[in-house]
Image (cartoon, grey):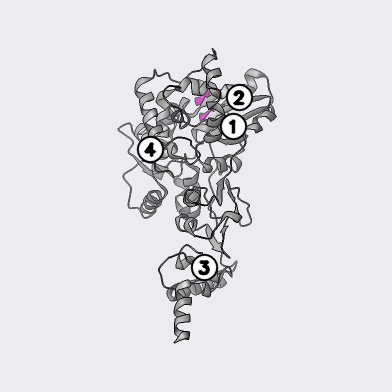
Amino acid sequence: MKNKEYYHALRFELENCTGCTKCVRVCPTEALRVRNGKVLIDNRRCIDCGNCLRACQYNAIQAVADDLDRIAGFKYRLAVLSAAYAGQFSENIGYRTAKKAILQIGFDEVAEEAMVTGMMSRIIREYIREHADQKPILSSNCPAVVRLIQVRFPSLLPSLLHVEAPMSVLAAYFREKIAREKNLGEEEIGIFLVVPCISQVTAVHQPEGAYRHLQDGAIAIQSVYREAIGKIKQAERDERQVDIYPRGLSWAISGMQAEEINNGEIKTLAVNGIDNVIEILSKIENHQIEKYDYVVLSNCLNGCIGGILNNENPFIATSRIRDLIRSAQHIDFHDDHFYEMFKQGKFDVLALEARPILTLAPDIKDALIKLKEIEELTRKLPGLDCSACGSPTCRALAEDIVEGKASFNDCMVLSRKKRGTQEK
C-alpha cells in the first residue's frame, strides 16, 4: 500500500493557478498544498470529493472523465445511467425521450440505476439483518465517502456495506446477460456508466474493494447531455420500446435511499455534505451514535442530483424527479437471476484497506521523535489556520516541515513578526 499509485479524476492546469489557497482550505483530507505559488496534490490523501474543483475560480482544477468516442471500440455498447440523469431534461422533452436519446448517440442498449433500487433495498435490508453486530452499517454508494473512511476513519471500514453500488451491480448483471443472449465475448461488450460526480469516475478506473473492473469507463452526465440534447427529434421518432422506472429515481435525491430502506424495523439516517459526513463519522467512531442500523452518507449536499458533473441546477432537477415519481406510471424490475447473483456473492466486494497518509518513519522510535517535533512546532505556530503558508492548518504546516516539504519561514504571521522585531 505504501507505494501504491492512485488514480484521480482531476487535472491541474498550473498555468491558471494563482496560489490563492481556496482549494487548500476546503479539502477535507488536507490533500492540497500551495508551494511556490502553485497547487500540489498528495495522491494518497485525495478522495475525489470535488470540493477543490468547486472552490477554484480560475479553471486551474478540472474534472476528467472518459470521452464518449471511447464507446466505438466495442461491438456492443451499454450505457448505465445514474438516477440523476432523468432530472437534467425539461418536462417538454420527457424522461422516456431523454432515455431514447442515449440510443441515438451510439449505444445499443440502456440500463439505469433506477431499475434496481427496489431490489437493492431488499438486498441491503437482508445484509443489515445478517450483520446486526456491526451496527450501524454504512452505505458504500458514494465513492468519495468510502475513500474518506479509508483516509480518516479506518476503524469504521468493517462497518461499510460490502455490496457493490447499484450501477456496478447492473454492470455485472448485464455483462453476463449480454454475453449469453448476444453470444459475445466479454471483451466485445463495452459498459459505460453515465455519472454525476468525479468520485464515480475514479471508482470505475480504480475500484476500491472490487474483485475486478466491472465497467469499461465513466462518462460525465454533462457530456452525454450535450450530445443527447441534439438528438431529441430523432429520439421522439424512435419507435423502439424503452421502459422507464420513475420510482427508482428517488435514490438520486438527498435522503431518499435511507427513507426507503427504513421499513419500520430498520432505523436509518441520511447525511449529506462532506463536513456533515465527517461530523457524523466522528460521532459513530466515538460511539456517540448507536441507535441507527443503516447510515447513508453522501458527499454532495443535494445527493447525487448535486454532483459536479451534472448539467442542471440541483433544485430544479430534484423538482423534476419528484414530479416524475408522483405522476409517471411505475413498473418494477424483477429477475430471479439478479437476486441469485447476489446470493452467489457476485455483487460482493473485498474488505477495504486503510490508506497510510502520514508515515513519519519506518522505525517506531524515529516516528515518535518526529511526532514530538510536530507537536512542538505546532505550539510555536500561531494557530490561526489561515492557510497563507500554503498548508491548510498550522499542524499541517508542522507536519510538512518535519517531512522536509516546507520551512518554518513559510508562516507569514511569524515572518512578519520577525521582520517587525528586526526593524525595531
Query: Disc 2 to disc 4, how far (Cα)?
Result: 29 Å
Q: Nearer the viewer, residue 3 or 86?
A: 86
Q: Amino acid at mark 3?
A: Glu
User: Mark 2 belongs to which amino acid?
Assistant: Phe
- How far, Cα to Cα, is label 4 from label 1? 24 Å
Q: Is residue 137 above or below residue 260?
A: below
Q: Which residue is mark 3?
A: 399
Give the percent coordinates (x, y) of residue 129.
Answer: 39, 36
Label 2 vs 3, first from the N-terminus: 2
Q: Do tag 2 and tag 3 residues touch (Cβ < 8 Å)? A: no
Disc 4 marks a residue whose amino acid type is Ser
Q: In the displayed structure, does residue 410 sit left or right of residue 251?
A: right
Q: Amino acid at mark 1?
A: Phe
Q: Which image quadrant for residue 360?
A: bottom right
Residue that protrudes farthest toward the top in the picture? 239
Q: Give the residue pinned by disc 1.
A: 192
Q: Which residues are magenta?
A: 338-342
Direction bottom: furthest residue: 424
Query: Residue 384: x percent and y percent?
Result: 40, 68
Q: Position of residue 49 (x, y in %)?
A: 49, 47
Residue 334 visible from this viewpoint: no
In terms of sequence position, does the residue under pointer 1 or pointer 3 come before the other?
A: 1
Classify residue 381 by image quadrant: bottom left
Count of marks placed on residues:
4
Tag 4, which secondary structure? loop
Instruction: Decide which of tag 4 and tag 3 comes sooner along the chain.
Output: 4
Q: Which mark is residue 107?
A: 2
Q: Quadrant of the C terminus?
A: bottom left
* Mark nearer the N terminus (2 vs 4): 2
